[in-house]
């Protein structure tokens, strides 16, 4: 990094966990800003947050591009402007599930849309005391809960990780 550069802005803007750690190669001076101070600053100077968001569009690594492309699998996100897509990417989270771990439970309400990034997800529903297998999602980009999420409906099936699974997700609040 060069003088005047910053990192951790995505965590400040989105309230997400930082995903990077930096180590210095030589002695340097580093400044920081606490979340509360940042929030006060952007209340007074909202343009700062807007400029930071505009700079995030410049991040075009492969995974970020893949995420944008996969958001197109969510029906109601297909016709959004490029600017809106770029902002949605900021709010995507990653969740990991181990083999056998539940992702969705039949009859529950979830406020997230899930997009399969890796692994396999088993879909099934329970009828009386019997599990009925519906499908196994294996293809990256498969979407779960895009309709129930909109109406906060109870989901009609269950989903569990068949093996180690990573999903990217976005909450209804962030949409």
Image (spheres, rainbow, N blue to C red):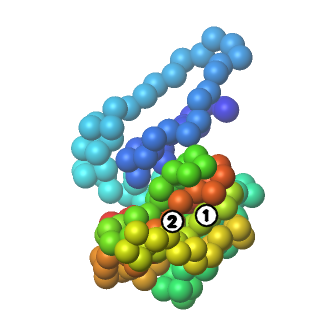
Q: Quadrant of the C terminus?
A: bottom left
Disc 2 is placed on an element classified as: strand
* Residue 98 spot, x, y in % from top left: 58, 46
Label pair 2/1, CB-CB below 8 angstroms: yes
Residue denoted by label 2: 159
* Crowd class of label 1 (few under 14; some 14 to 19; many from 20; radius 10 Å): many
Residue drawn 38% across the image and 32% down it: 33
- Depth check: 160 or 67 in front? 160
* Residue 99 spot, x, y in % from top left: 60, 49
Residue drawn 54% across the image and 80% down it: 74
Q: Which mark is residue 148?
A: none
Specify which label sits upstream in the sequence, 2 or 1. 1
* Crowd class of label 2 (few under 14; some 14 to 19; many from 20; radius 10 Å): many
- Depth check: 69 or 97 in front? 97
- Residue projecting furthest to the top: 27
Say which quarter of the image contains residue 56.
bottom right
Residue 69 seen in render: yes
Residue denoted by label 1: 121
Q: Is residue 101 above or below residue 154?
A: above
Say which quarter of the image contains residue 118.
bottom right
* Residue 2 spot, x, y in % from top left: 66, 32
Q: Is residue 41 above or below residue 58?
A: above
Residue drawn 25% across the image and 50% down it: 44
Q: Is residue 166 above or below residue 127?
A: above
Disc 1 is placed on an element classified as: strand
Q: Quadrant of the N terminus?
A: top right
Residue drawn 31% across the image and 50% down it: 42
């Amino acid at each position: 990094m060069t003088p005047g550069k910053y990192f951790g802005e995505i965590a400040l803007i989105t309230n997400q966990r930082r995903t990077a750690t930096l180590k210095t190669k030589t002695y340097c001076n580093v400044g920081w800003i606490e979340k509360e101070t940042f929030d006060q600053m952007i209340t007074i100077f909202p343009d700062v947050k807007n400029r930071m968001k505009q700079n995030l569009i410049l991040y075009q690594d492969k995974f970020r591009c893949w995420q944008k492309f996969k958001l197109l699998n969510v029906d109601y996100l297909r016709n959004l402007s490029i600017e809106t897509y770029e902002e949605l990417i900021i709010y995507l989270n990653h969740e990991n599930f181990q083999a056998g771990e539940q992702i969705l439970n039949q009859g529950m309400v979830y406020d997230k849309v899930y997009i399969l990034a890796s692994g396999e997800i088993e879909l099934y529903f329970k009828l009386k005391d019997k599990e009925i297998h519906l499908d196994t999602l294996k293809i990256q980009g498969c979407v779960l809960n895009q309709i129930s999420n909109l109406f906060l409906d109870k989901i009609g099936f269950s989903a569990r990780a068949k093996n180690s699974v990573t999903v990217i997700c976005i909450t209804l609040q962030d949409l």
